[in-house]
Image (cartoon, rainbow, N blue to C red):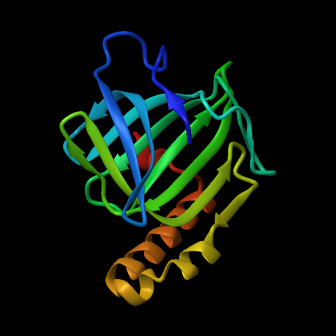
């Protein structure tokens, strides 16, 4: 994902760089604006900007889309609310990750390959990239982390199918 924080959260928001790590390497870094940090959950906002349109078939991420991203220090996932430039909700893209670590102005998150999408109206809930997760070898290298990742995806799917993420995000 390529994003920019310019105008994403208004002026007075401290900048943070989100660093997504995968397989021990940095997959992507992007600027965001801190929205809230209660000590457990960190919320940031960023604009989709650099990579043009990314069409997944079930959703298109486009320049001007606003991502409000929620990360936890004690949970194995992140939840990203996606809105178009006019503020219309597209849905939620969820990443299964190790718990987030805030280090100075960097929010570091290790991606564990599993993802989930929930459309704005809740009619489309889909698990993503389970084949990539199986091929990653995490279950052999770190069975505990693999079990936590699968449990996190199951929890996200249950939340998505039973009304969404409002309880997590308020």
Q: What percent of the width, then of the height, locates residue 71?
A: 36, 48
Q: What percent of the width, then of the height, locates residue 66?
A: 57, 28
Q: Nearer the viewer, residue 96 or 161?
A: 96
How many dots with numbers?
Answer: 0
For the view shown, which residue lies furthest in the bottom direction?
A: 140
In this picture, residue 52 sits left or right of residue 20: right
In this picture, residue 28 sits left or right of residue 126: left
In this picture, residue 4 sits left or right of residue 82: left
Give me the residue at 64% from left, 67% from top: 127
Give me the residue at 65% from left, 53% from top: 118
Q: Quadrant of residue 62?
A: top right
**Image quadrant occupied by the C terminus:** top left
For the view shown, which residue lies furthest in the top direction?
A: 11
For the view shown, which residue lies furthest in the right direction?
A: 57
Give me the residue at 70% from left, 51% from top: 122
> In the displayed structure, would residue 89 be above or below residue 169?
above
> In the displayed structure, would residue 62 be above or below residue 57?
above
Q: Nearer the viewer, residue 71 or 122?
A: 71
Q: Quadrant of residue 38?
A: top left
Give me the residue at 59% from left, 46% from top: 92
Q: What percent of the width, then of the height, locates residue 93?
A: 58, 49
For the view shown, which residue lies furthest in the front direction?
A: 25
Q: What percent of the width, then of the height, locates residue 155?
A: 48, 68
> In the displayed structure, would residue 25 be above or below residue 107?
below
**Image quadrant occupied by the N terminus:** top right
């Amino acid at each position: 994902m390529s994003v920019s924080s310019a105008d994403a959260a208004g002026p007075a928001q401290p900048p943070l760089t989100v660093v997504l790590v995968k397989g021990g390497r940095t997959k992507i870094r992007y600027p965001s604006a801190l929205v809230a940090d209660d000590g457990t959950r960190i919320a940031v906002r960023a604009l989709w900007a650099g990579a043009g349109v990314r069409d997944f078939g079930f959703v298109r991420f486009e320049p001007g889309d606003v991502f409000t991203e929620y990360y936890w220090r004690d949970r194995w996932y992140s939840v990203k609310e996606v809105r178009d430039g006019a503020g219309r909700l597209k849905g939620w893209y969820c990443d299964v990750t190790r718990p987030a670590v805030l280090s100075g102005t960097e929010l570091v998150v290790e991606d564990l390959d599993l993802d989930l999408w929930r459309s704005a109206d809740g009619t489309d809930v889909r698990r993503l990239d389970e084949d990539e997760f199986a091929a990653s070898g995490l279950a052999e290298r770190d069975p505990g982390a693999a079990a936590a990742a699968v449990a996190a995806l199951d929890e996200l799917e249950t939340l998505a199918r039973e009304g969404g993420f409002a309880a997590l995000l308020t």
